[in-house]
Image (cartoon, rainbow, N blue to C red):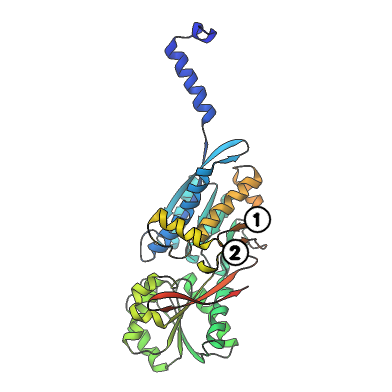
Amino acid sequence: MTTNLQRMLPISAAVALFATFATTAQADEVVRIGHVAPLTGGIAHLGKDNENGARLAIEEINKKGLVIGGQKVTLELDAQDDAADPRTATQVAQKLVDDKVLAVVGHLNSGTSIPASKIYSDAGIVQVSPSATNPVFTLQGFKTTYRIVATDAQQGPALANFAARTLKIKSVAIVDDSTAYGQGLASEFEKAARSLGINVLSHDATNDKAVDFRAILTKIKGENPEAIMYGGMDSTGGPFSKQARQLGVRAKVLGGDGVCNDNLADLAGEAADNVVCSVAGVAFEKMADGPVFLAKYQQRFGHPVEMYAPYSYDALYIIVDAMKRANSTDPAKILAAMPMTDHKGVTGETTFDAHGDLKHGVISLYTYKGGKKTLLDFVRL
């Protein structure tokens, strides 16, 4: 049978035209969501862990199928490396704005999340950090900044309370790595420790690239504190703890979420068993869907979760939830939908206060036994 179209066009032209119609009808709208974390340097393992969490969420959502405003949408992760460097972070943030991402999951560090946040704010793009804990991040007056972990204003006091009331610590020396995260956590810990009657003997600073802590530790050994609070990441906290043991420092080492992962045991060796640390979120074993997520992650990436992958996974789903409620891929409409978030994910229920912080956070406290991170307690906020 000959159609009218075939009479009007050569067969090859008709085929090409039908192919064009079919392609147009079936084409998905491809939208980008940014992710930023350090993928190089001393804490690249934590950055890749965060990226993997976001990537797992995107793969699941694409597999299930996503329709927004009657159009099938395919998500694409625009993953960038800020090397945990504030200047690089602002350059990467501008690149993501130029790439026209709809929202950003990141950055990992407070010291990169804070400077990058102004760029996202100026562009009207939602930024959800799965791991930045410095209170300043959400207190700048930006409507675009959100986080799904507790803050150092909560984590520092929780760690100090545990030190005073459970460990019965009476004196402490404090060391921070001079980053926004390390300084912020150490300062919050110090304020709480003093209010609890702990004698703060000293507060010293190192940097986040240091490898030799013997001078500071020798000084602290002479002060003979019952504990040392270290504000920094595992890449320095591990060697710090190991060198303290080698120098015969008997003090318990306290740390925040920057040191509180399985990698610490590799870096600190047997000294890890002398560490008590906090995480600004719920422990995997206390997450309702924790075991399921851990199994999925292990199967997809071939190794266990480091720390905040469940939070970057939830952050991605929270952004898509806002997209669904807005029924739009317009960044402005997604931003307008974010304050009404009420998402039940792997890490629990997420609702935000007026600053973009969690209304109900959790602090988990750990130690190490035989090099294995072990839950001690948790505090609901």
Give, as a three-letter code, the residue at label 1.
Thr
- Residue 222 can be seen, yes or no: yes
Q: Residue at x 47, y 14 (%)?
A: 14
Badge 1 element: loop
Sooner in the amino-acid sequence: mark 2 or mark 1? 2
Residue 138 disc label: 2
Image location (x, y in percent) of residue 288: 57, 63
Question: Which amino acid type is marked by label 2?
Answer: Thr
Give the answer, above or below, for where 113 lies relative to 324. below
Which of the two discs, 2 and 1, sits closer to the camera? 1
Disc 2 is placed on an element classified as helix
Name the residue located 48 percent from the left edge and 18 percent from the top edge. 17
Q: Residue 369 lies in what quarter of the image?
A: bottom left
The answer to whether 273 appears left or right of 285 in the picture is left
**Which residue is labeled 1 in the image?**
341
Residue 225 or residue 65, whichever sits in front:
65
